[in-house]
Image (cartoon, grey):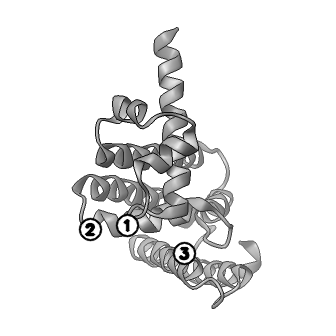
């Protein structure tokens, strides 16, 4: 019972850490900020995570696990390639307001200085690419999509999504979220020989 409670408490602490880091950024977040937001002492944080760097890495791992679980749900889906593509584009869309993108963008910056964050972010990116490429290949195989190079199309689509995510969060007044959504859907449709309306 105590172990179960401890595990749940740990999950709550990681969730709170993600929320605070997404709001304040890795560079401006102190352990005392997370402790206050979670309603616990700093001593309890250090009991569970030992150091600030470990807490940050495990918070990002927690967020990564949630995202990988969502990717896994799409991978296991029995929908058509087009259905699965729609779900994946919606999940990854920077046009949907989410604190998650702020966390990812900040983590990418930190990953240039942290091998642990770099490994985690690379694993998430790799899983997303593998999933999108498999969806495109399945769509080509069944005749839903037309794409001569699924691997290159995957890199271009996800690179565009990541780029727009940065634009919409760093320069939020430059492009409307609706415009971003249209641009991403149009690019994906062009890559796969689809009418934009299908996405």
The reply to whether residue 69 is visible in this rendering is no
Judge whether 196 appears above or below 97 on screen.
below
Q: How far, Cα to Cα, is label 1 from label 3?
A: 12 Å
Q: Are marks 2 and 3 in contact (CB under 8 Å)?
A: no
The reply to whether residue 98 is visible in this rendering is yes
Q: Secondary structure at mark 1?
A: helix
Give the camera-side residue of 179 and 196. 179
Judge whether 193 appears above or below 12 on screen.
below
| Mark earlier in primary sequence (2, 3) | 2
Q: Are marks 1 and 3 in contact (CB under 8 Å)?
A: no
Residue for point 41% across, 74% down: 155
Q: Are marks 2 and 1 in contact (CB under 8 Å)?
A: yes
Query: Which residue is label 3 attached to?
Result: 165
Q: Is residue 102 left or right of residue 109?
A: right
Q: Residues within 10 Å of mark 3 (few under 14, many from 20)?
A: many
Q: How far, Cα to Cα, is label 2 from label 1?
A: 7 Å
The image quadrant of residue 85 is bottom right
Residue for point 26% across, 52% down: 116
Q: Quadrant of the C terminus?
A: bottom right
Query: Which residue is label 2 attached to?
Result: 112
Judge whether 36 appears above or below 19 on screen.
above
Q: How far, Cα to Cα, is label 2 from label 3?
A: 18 Å
Rendered location of residue 162, percent (x, y): 48, 74
- Say which mark, if any, is on residue 108: 1
């Amino acid at each position: 019972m105590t172990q179960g409670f401890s595990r749940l408490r740990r999950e709550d602490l990681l969730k709170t850490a993600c929320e605070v880091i997404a709001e304040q950024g890795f560079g401006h977040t102190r352990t005392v900020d997370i402790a206050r937001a979670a309603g616990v002492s700093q001593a309890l944080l250090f009991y569970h995570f030992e150091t600030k760097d470990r807490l940050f890495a495990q918070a990002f791992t927690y967020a990564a696990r949630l995202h990988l679980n969502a990717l896994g749900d799409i991978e296991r889906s029995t929908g058509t390639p087009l259905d699965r593509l729609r779900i994946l584009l919606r999940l990854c869309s920077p046009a949907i307001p989410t604190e998650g993108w702020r966390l990812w963008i900040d983590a990418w910056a930190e990953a240039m200085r942290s091998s642990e964050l770099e490994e985690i972010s690379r694993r998430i990116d790799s899983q997303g690419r593998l999933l999108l490429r498999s969806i495109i290949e399945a769509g080509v195989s069944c005749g839903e999509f037309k794409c001569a190079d699924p691997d290159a199309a995957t890199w271009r689509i996800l690179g565009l999504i990541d780029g727009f995510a940065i634009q919409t969060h760093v320069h939020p007044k430059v492009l409307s979220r609706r415009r971003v959504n249209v641009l991403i859907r149009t690019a994906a449709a062009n890559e796969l020989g689809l009418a934009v309306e299908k996405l």
